[in-house]
Image: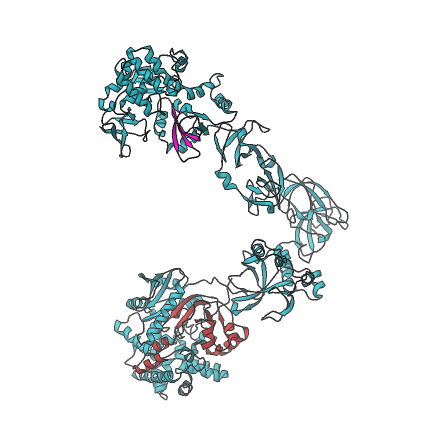
Chain colours: A cyan, B red
Amino acid sequence: MSKKFFRPPPQAMDDSDSEEDEEELLDDDAEVDDEDVTEVSPPNKSKPTNNANLSESDDDDDEPDERPPKRKGRHIDNNGNADARSSNKRAKPTSFFELEAEASDSEDDDADDAAKQLHKDSEQMDEEAREIIRQQDRRRAQAGGRFDRSVAEISADIENRHRAQRRVRPPMDRDDEDDFDDGGAPPDATPEGYTAVAQQSLVPSVSDPSMWMVSCANGKEHELVCQIMNKCVAMARQGRPVGISSAIAAQSKGKIYLESFSEPAVVDAIQGVRGLLQYTMRLVPIGDMTTVMTVTSRKKPVQKNEWVRMTRGHYKHDLALVKDVKESGLKCVVQCVPRLDLTLADLPPAEARMRRKTVRPPQKFFNPQEIAALGRHGLTRQRFPGLNLYCDYFDGNYYHDGYLLKEMTVGSMIKACTDEDPPTLDELQRFQRRQSKQNEEDGGDENEGSKMAASLLDELSDLQGRTGLGKTKTGGGGGLLIGDTIEVIEGDLIGMRGKLVSLDGTTVKVKPINANVDLGGTDEIEFLGNQLRKYIPVGAHVKVTDGRYANETGVVVAVEQLDGETDFTAVVLTDVTNKEISVRTSQLRESAEVASGQDKLQGYELYDLVVLSGGGSANEVGVIVRVGREDFTVINNHGIVREIRPEELRGKRNSTSQRAVALDVQGNQIRASDSVNVVEGPHKGKTATIKRMSRAQLFLHSQTRTDHAGIFVVRSRSCVLAGTRTQARGATPDSGVSPFATPQSQSRGGPQPGRGKRDDGLIGKTVRIQAGQWKGYLGTVADATATHVQVELHSRLKKVMVVRERVAVAGDKFGATQEQNRMVDVNPNPIAPTTPFVAAGQTPMHGGATPMHGGALDGDTSDEVWQPGGAVDQDAVKDDDGWGSTANDGFGSPKDGDSDGWGSTSDQPKGWGTYPAVKDNTVKKEVPSTNGNGVKREQAKREMEAELDTEETPGWYMERVCVQNKSKDKQGVIKEIDPATKAAVVEYEDQTFETLRASELAMVPPSEHDTVLVTGGNEIGLEGSLVCVDGSDAILKDANDEFKIVEISFLAKVKTI
Amino acid sequence: MSYDEDERGEEDVPAQVAELANASVPTNLKAVRACKRCGILKTPEQFLDDGCENCPFLHMADDMQQVNKCTTAFYEGQAAVMDPRDSWAAKWIRVDAYLPGVYAITVTGNFDRDIEEDLENRGIRWRCRPPQN
């Protein structure tokens, strides 16, 4: 339908179309026509806002009654129109338009037109119409339109509009400048007169339809607008037009705009359109409507002979020149330097595919002879489709003059070089085909693209004030810049030095430095560029501006003129590498700048841990200690320094290094950025930071070292973690999870922080469990108490509690001495070093031994020893883990008054000292037997059996725990426990202090509402208030008001601070 | 055309509705081109089949070369104009004198010199603007 309907030329049935037709028929009359227009409607044109379109429509709606004839005329028109349409849009209108044309020679606007049609000879009517138009124009000028109309009027207006049958209005389009001027810049009349002022007069007014915004999915705007359009078209065809006047998808993401006089119409229009969120509909304030319509063009068509850059494939980032634009700028033919990989064809397909993906062939001009010499087939001469160019056709591509010609899609395949990203000199140089080669091949003209590159090169070189670039290299005075010190090397003034004042093509102006030269009044002398050379004195600090060593800095150690060279060569000792490099003086500039070297080369940076390829070893890694212009210096894991090219590197391992953990000689975990002391080897005694680590090799960085950027390689076992971070590590990472953390940190906060320190000796160390269920397992000590350590097993995700003496620091031969070393720092006493270790490892055993001893020594007190158990109600005792266990522990505590508890072990008369460690049941039976207390014996036995692995010192024997002096029956709180002797300082309620041993103390059994500390079991370390006791279980409420059920034997009453 | 017949059956079909009923909408969301002169958006095929309804003098119908010359893919924004007379947006982008259809908000491009001259001679203005840098 549309095909038929929109067949172009005779689009008639209204004046505009007819005009169009007329124009086609009588092209020459176009201007006459226009003149006619201006003549016929002078009043119109004289109005400042002569908006023929609007004036006419205003006309229609405001004066419907005044001008019935006009409407009638329209009506007739309309009918005629409809007829024309329905029968054949193209065939009939000709006559219709001719009729129209006959009727009125001026087609300026419909009002005139219609009026004329009915009253062809009546000038009066015409005048009347004009008068009305004038009125309308005035009104419009005042307020931009129908601001004061009633609803009825508006509806009448709409109705009239629907009746209006104008369409394209060529007169407007044809408005030429004169018309425009005459008409006082009527904006509508000059749709293309896009001046800001003209546009300003188009700002929306209240009489214009309102605009609603509707949200939609991002990117669907265009589609939705088309859908709405389709819907409106379909509805119109059914004779039920949707009352919206436009739908707009501008550049606001996820929003479309609909324009209508009525909101229901908008709702109607978006009803059933998928993807529109109807509830988001919102009225756009009239002031924001212009903003909605503001778009900035993002896409830009490429133009012929424009420089572009490839955005995809092997040619990505390559410079190319647009040779031809196709499909109205969507596609273009570009010329670029080929990257042909001739080896591909010889490879098996899979490998070729791989290679195609990974290897980017270098830029190289296409050489048909070379291809032919390789014996390749398929090289033909062919015309490039669409261009009148004969090209070499090879492997699906066209090559012209050695360049690749390729059709590309603009936008996706190429993009124009922007101002920020212009073609660089380097690129242009590569693009430029050397003249000599060119001649060899074609013996004729240089390629156009090459010429363009050359000319742009020259332009750029000129801009940069340099010569010696491109083809127009002008001999001598290369690299001269204003401000340079120069020396005259030719002519009378040879040897004179001066400062370069200005550059002008080949001549330069120089201001001499030496005052003793008589210049005859002038202070500037002009030279030719090649009469001068840049003067670089020996000793000057220079920067290389160009060439292979560009951006290096250094000190000039010598300047010499090599044989056969016009330019001087300077030997520069570089700042970074301390190497001597030879550079032409033209490439140097005096500068105080000290280059820090490159910081990056092909993605690798200084101090990167890299994997090296080659060199035999598969796992060779190293750290980059220098980044050069085209290579790196790498120190490998054996400490060997090598120069490595980027291609030899197989990626970075920085993240691995960051995660890696190694053990120092003490078994401390060390990580990257830890500070360590080197204890053996050639670097012994140095303190450095771990920069990178790879397995057991540490790449240490010391700021005091200058060689290899401060990096040296040491085995992790030759280092010891420096500083106090051992403790920090033990406490911080685990504090959240360790059940011991709470009491410990609390005790540290207490009166004697010393205790924590002792315990920390093991924390963080790797230990091997030497007995028990976990015998043989390796783990890290996560936490430690006086008697126990919590070991996080390496092989299992598990933490186990182990008696302290059952673990051994899994060190090497240094194990003991390192412990000593560490302690030496803390305590200079030569004997002291062994103490903590022994204390940590052996005290519990000894402690365990003591009770027997105590029991044997004074049988009288043995009942007292059990007293705490007896004090608790009997049910609890009878239960397996009643208070008895605590009592038993108490029993197990060292009882004798020896300050050196363990020393007494050897004195034990019956040689039982070892029994608690062995935990032999038969022996245990013996213990109570001495007491003569069968019940207790049974209890003790059960207790021992139940807790094979647990402690021999009472679990409650901790700081803050409320205790009772058995002998005095006084209650107090343990203020601190001497780590070495296990003696406790007890503060009584009357503020007096006494030092007592564990065996002299009994725990005060907790009662309800007491603050208690859990000393064993799963909830160990938990502190809360005891809510009630239920059999052997105690219910307590922790700090988070959560209830916990704990065996009552694990509870110790503590004093709240 | 059946719709047209229906319309004829009805009394007094408003011209604007009739125009809208015959408006052309891009049949494909990809490869939409804008007429450089009026900015209407259609696919190249539509231009080839029907030409440009607003600019018959460009003779785009059945002439792919002319279609390529006179249309451009470089435009910004779409405004589906159902009622060019009433629509403020149409007025703002100065398509109020054209037929209903989907129009570009801005059109980037240049006419060939000869077409430009021809249009100038006829006093016809065009919407496309050369790209600005």
Report if residue A670 lies within the magenta region.
Answer: no
Coordinates of residue A100 in the picture (x, y in percent): 40, 86
Chief SS of the magenta region:
strand
Which quadrant of the view contains residue A95? bottom left
What residue is drawn where x is 49% and y is 18%? A828
Which quadrant of the view contains residue A115? bottom left
Residue at far bottom of view: A121
Quadrant location of the C terminus of chain A? Answer: top left
Report if residue A791 lies within the magenta region.
Answer: yes
Q: Is residue A446 visible?
A: yes
| Foreground residue among A741 and A286 | A741
| Foreground residue among A815 and A290 | A815
When the figure is inspected, residue A348 is found, relative to residue A235, above or below; the finding is above
Give the magenta range.
A774-803
Q: Is residue A422 visible?
A: no
When the figure is inspected, residue A963 is found, relative to residue A394, above or below; the finding is above
Residue at far front of view: A922
Q: Is residue A763 left or right of residue A274?
A: right
